[in-house]
Image (cartoon, rainbow, N blue to C red):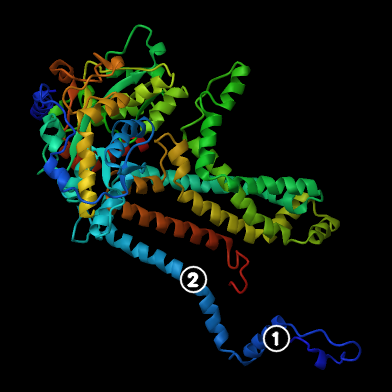
Amino acid sequence: MALSPGRSGLGAGPSPAPYRLSWRILDALEAVAARWPARAEGAIRWLLLLPALLVVGLLVFGLLVMGDASLRVMDFRTYRLSEQHSLANYVRLWGWGAFHATLWRSLGATLLVTLLCLVLAFPYARALTRTSSARLRRLLLVGLFLPFFVGQVVRAYGWLVILGQQGLVNQVLGLLGLGPYRLLFAYETVLFGLVQYMLPFAVLMLAPALAAIPEEIERAAASCGASPVRALLRIVLPMARPGLVAAALVVATLTLTDFAMPAILGGGTNDFLANLVHDQFFRTSNAGLGSAIALVLTFLGTTVAGLLLALAGPGALGVRGAR
Amino acid sequence: MNDPSFFTSRRRLLGSATALAAGFAVPAVLRAQEPAKPAELIVRAWGGVWVDSLKKGVSDPFTAKTGIRIRHDLTEDNEIKPRIWAAVQQGRTPPIHVNWDTTANATSSALRGVCESLADLPNLAKVLPLAKPIGLEGVPIVNLYSYVYVLAYRPEVFPGGAPTSWSVLLEPRFKGRIALYNDGIGFHPVAQVMGGGKVSDIPGNMEPCWAFIRKLKEQKPLLGEDPDFTNWFQKGEIDVACTISSNAREAKAKGVNVAWTVPKEGAKVDTDGMWIPKGLTANELYWAKRYIDFALSTEAQQVWLDGLGLPGVAPGLRPPADLVGDPSYPTTEKDFERLILIPPRIQAEHTAEWFARFKEIMQS
């Protein structure tokens, strides 16, 4: 509560300062808050959650519409979806080799990119949170945030310039009498581009978790005779688990649903599921089949996230009250 | 090459080669009843040399004549299509006034019933019969020119002269250095012939086509779209490609040493057109039609298609100097004997199926 000069007991001496309008407003608000019924607090929480719930609700509505479209077959004589519902689109996916190839390619990339990002992000995040050099920390922060200012498509085109037949890498190799080599338009190139794109996300998710581990604990482990490796494996990694799981979740789901890297760096023969969805909607105008693939992709993303959380155990994200 | 529909279409293409002097003039009676002019018309177009040529040959002169500003929307033709369809279905104003589109893609919109009729365009009576779409009721689309999917190549890798067969695509030295469209468009009929099949078997039996594409897959081709071909030739990524001659010509204009040919097995010829989505106001529809009508005129086509290096449907066009006698600029019966036309309706009805097979091979 704001103190008024009359009630503060400090009224003696020179004339008191005028009681400001802003203080009076705050007093009024406090008075209202004091009379606010305790049970209304729950309503306020829901009110604050409402925008987020609306956004998610719209997403669910979109999924329902796609679910309906996925059960209708496109008639290419009229380019309209059938009136009748059936599982024909899903049956077709089951027997379509391109879908299988794309599915396994997407899942394989998700696994590899997530693992690589975690391995590469950990030392970066640790250096960022543990270094005593302000200059190094600034440098690492710039390295972390700079990529966010450059969009994914621009970065992918950057790799086209660097890795092309007449690109920087082949020019350097040429000086050594090597190459030129085809470095673009392969699965490995797509993975490389994805790792480069996802790494800052992983560092960003991991750094707060590492920063929350008190250095004293590591020093205590060392003073008790634990080697640095043992301390890392037995102390740091378990305590960093919320950050590791969060990083894995973000990288895995973004990779699984990525479109631009396979489209730009894949040379047309290394598509992911998102590319297949795009093709169905925009190239063949088959909204039914496109919706079916989109729903499979959504299901896969949810499953990957669920599996990660299940593997990491209860409370993996460090959310209070998680069991 | 024995497909009767091909010969029929070829005759249609050449049927009025001697026809009619061009003219932009709209009858005075029509001018007197002209509805209010919109501030602008939005015309969807492809980027690069495509939109530059359209602007120079059609849009800017149209603005000069009518005072209506033309805005070019460079959204891909495949991507604007579902937006137009949704707008028409929901009774909203479509996002564009005129869609410059491949005839095959436009045919899918015509089959869905979202195109306005263009049968009353004055210039339609003065151009080659090819301007009217084959196999569709009425005139929902107007074809404006034809183009050929040529074999483009780097002359330095063929010191003995231009390749004479599409079989060069299978030469081991070109492994990883060939390119096709990422949906196989433009290559299916050629692959059918190369696989030992007949064009007349399309779409009934295309196994020879898929067999050849499976062989081609072993060559690790790059798959892309129009701008990619120019870029790949420029950056030295490819030596040989099946692409529209305009892309090769653009690369050449940018200083890349690229040439093109129509091999002995033939090459696919196709058309592009324009159409107007339903849902425009009456005055917008009128002026959108006037725009397309102007695009049909000799005056507009001469400048526009000089830029693209493509033969138009207006009579009396002069080929660009660099394309006189070029097989990718067919003007005579003999030129067309080497070209393969698949009716757009067949393409529209089977695109998804062909795309699925092509993807299955290329993504596996």
Q: Quadrant of residue A66?
A: bottom left
Q: Nearer the viewer, mark 2 or mark 1?
A: 1
Q: Could you give the CA–CA distance between mark 2 and mark 1, rounded to whole angstroms?
A: 32 Å
Q: What residue type is labelled 2?
A: Pro
Query: Closer to the N terminus: mark 2 or mark 1?
Result: 1
Q: Which residue is drawn at 32% across and 55% down?
A: A291
Q: In which quarter of the image is the N terminus of chain B?
A: top left
Does residue A240 lie above or below A147 as drawn?
Answer: below
Label 2: which secondary element: helix
Label 1: which secondary element: helix
Q: Disc 2 designates what residue? A: A51
User: Percent x, y for residue B331?
Assistant: 18, 19
Q: Disc 1 designates what residue? A: A24
Label 2: few (<14), some (14–19) or many (≥20) C-alpha neighbours in 10 Å:
few
Does residue B209 lie above or below A143 as drawn?
Answer: above
User: Percent x, y for residue B192?
Assistant: 21, 27
